[in-house]
Amino acid sequence: MESIQDKLMKLTQNLWWTWRPEIRALFRDIDPKLYNSVHRNPLRVVGSVDPAFLENRAAEADIVIRTDRALRQLKEYLNPMATWGLIHGEALNARPVAYFCAEFGIHESLPIYSGGLGILAGDHLKGASNLGVPLVGVGLLYHQGYTAQVLDKTFWQHDVIEPYNLEDLPITFAKDADGNLLTVPLELPGRTIYARILEVPVGRVRLILLDSRDPRNSEEDQRLTARLYGGDQHTRIQQELLLGIGGSRALRALGINASVYHLNEGHCSFAILERAMWRVKNDGLDPYFALKESAQATVFTTHTPVDAGHDRFPVNLAAEYLKPLADGLGLPLEEVLGFGRVDPRNSGSPFMPTVLALKHSRRANGVAALHGVVSRRMWQCLWPERAETDVPIGHITNGVHVPTWLAAEIDQLYRIHLGTNWADNIVKPDMWLKIEEIDPAEIWEVKQVLKARMIRFVRGKAKDKADRLEMPQPDLSAFDPDTLTIGFARRFVTYKRPDLLFRDLDRLDRLVNHPTKPLNLIFAGRSHPADNPGKEIIKLVGQMIEDPRFKNRIVFVENYNMNVGRNLYQGIDGWLNCPRRPLEACGTSGMKVVMNGGLHISILDGWWAEAYDGENGFAIGNGEIHANHEIQDQRDYESLFKLLEEVIVPMYYERDSQSGIPTRWIQRMKRSIRTLSWRFNADRMLMDYVRHSYLPAAGASNAQMPPP
Ligand SMILES: *Cc1c(COP(=O)(O)O)cnc(C)c1O
């Protein structure tokens, strides 16, 4: 008979558990303390728990029954009778979509992501899995992971590498029929390096990762995939070559004949050239024809309107690395360099992978309606003969993978009121009408439970930090479920303006310390390790927390990651988002808050510009932009404070004389859930990509195309 340990181990081998709260609870119940100490990684729980203890525990907590049930469900999930993807994505069944991205955020125990882009990619894979859309992810395995944020006494951010072991994750090395490790070669200046191929099952979807730790490589080359976004321009272009070229080769090595390449950000653009090069070498195609064919089967998503977010490789550096590609295509190097230039004839200008992708993809899109507009303006230079509105960049608004981010208690509430299969109908607006029928007291009670849990979480984190720094414990007694609590958690970078609240401290003092209507603020977020201006803002928030006026009202939670995020999204009342419009491409954290019954308080930027209807949350300002940042910041600050003082705080504390609950606030919660949940989720996002991007591109990849 299979031991309980073996069964549990089997359950850990597919990252399906990352979005199954009942399975995460199962592993937690084995040993809650152990569970938290190993970053909530089930594999490590099973690997380190004492077998005798487990046998005892299994009897107490129904572990065996729950494990058997979960295994049965996993088996059913992996062998579906019918899925949306099977029916609507038929053309993709034989040849899947390859989704390329430099980072994937699936769970905090697999630290190969840094922020929004990676978590979106993780949500995309999970969404594809749920709908049964044939798709494989392609990325890099960063073996040192991303850094953890550790703050010192002055709130200065230190970036600490948190190494992890592959054995603690359900990652397997791909092998050939003889059991040898599968590798792919990559030509770099003066040498060829090799990368191993690893695979991770994410539900019904596979994630393929490349790792440069092959003994044939020099030590330096083995460190190529050590860190996400680490190193200099050389590291960067080499990583991008490995992702695009190595990634395409890995697909072929695994026998995956992808129909469509979905490239996310310029980091993976070289895949376009590799695919064409292979057709030239293998099938003797004309290079221009091959490039056109490759482009017709490629869809490109740009994720940022921030100019510095797009790589620019100096000509000499690019020339050195692109030589093998030009040779393989049989084209002059100068011509290939031109693919990455706004004006190909401008031989001095740097090579931009984003430009390469925009010029060589069938369809390009931004990640929200407004971001589409901004991207068309930004890249009109590539189509100078066209009007801005005719620039061929559309948009597909991002969505979040609901089961990953939803509190179990909210799921339960939806089950009762929307039906047990509500998640299957998530994109249907009519289903969400039933939200209005829920008794306000009931939804409020659930929210208060979640808020109390978040506060316990935040207190625990604050205690851990004080203990580590040997500092006195902060007094967080003012953090209670009856006080309006607003959260701000995101990357600390100047354009997101985490300091917008701190322009007038006396006014902030009056707001947060109001005798009857106080306000608590929870901050979290980190800066890129090289972003000192961003780190300065964290320090500034730290100084605010040391100010006696604010020290009981503001708290900063260290090391924002998926776990910290999940806890905050589920419990918070209001979620503050105040980027300098129009620099937030989409933003997704607010979507995670909304479906958990929190209200979004945001500048009309990113997704909020198309989502806000006047009553389903709050808008800061009216979407105005000013060429002068200082004027724009001051104006937005005024709008934010007016909104807080005159609308948000009064509404939260306006209580029904009978029931004591904030009726108008709850009305807004319901409207927010009803009008936003059906749109801003991963199912809708995947359906849009399948219909508008993947199917057309898959058709074209088989079609005969005339030579250019
Ligand atoms: C969702 C999420 C993000 C992205 O959210 P934004 O609104 O784009 O900042 C970043 N980090 C974590 C941990 C997340 O869960």
Image: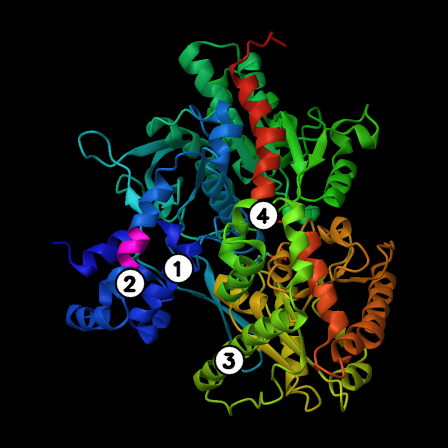
Q: Amino acid at mark 1?
A: Ser
The residues colored magenta run 66-71
**Cα gap from disc 1 to disc 4, whole angstroms:** 28 Å
Q: Quadrant of ligand 1?
A: bottom right
Residue 560 placement (x, y as % from top left): 53, 66
**Where 536 falls versus 301 (above or below)?**
below
Q: Earlier in the sequence, mark 4 or mark 2?
A: 2
Q: Earlier in the sequence, mark 1 or mark 3?
A: 1
Q: Is residue 282 left or right of residue 650?
A: left
The residue carrying mark 1 has its beta carbon less than 8 Å from ligand 1:
no
**Total numbered badges shown on the rendered structure:** 4
According to the picture, the residue beneath numbered tag 1 turns out to be 109
Which quarter of the picture shows residue 376? top right
Question: What is the secondary structure assignment of the residue under circle 2?
Answer: helix
Q: Is residue 185 left or right of residue 411?
A: left
**Cα gap from disc 2 to disc 1, whole angstroms:** 10 Å
Residue 619 placement (x, y as % from top left): 79, 61
Q: Disc 2 vs disc 1: Cβ atoms closer than 8 Å? A: yes
Residue 216 placement (x, y as % from top left): 27, 39
According to the picture, the residue beneath numbered tag 4 turns out to be 426
Q: Disc 4 vs disc 2: Cβ atoms closer than 8 Å? A: no
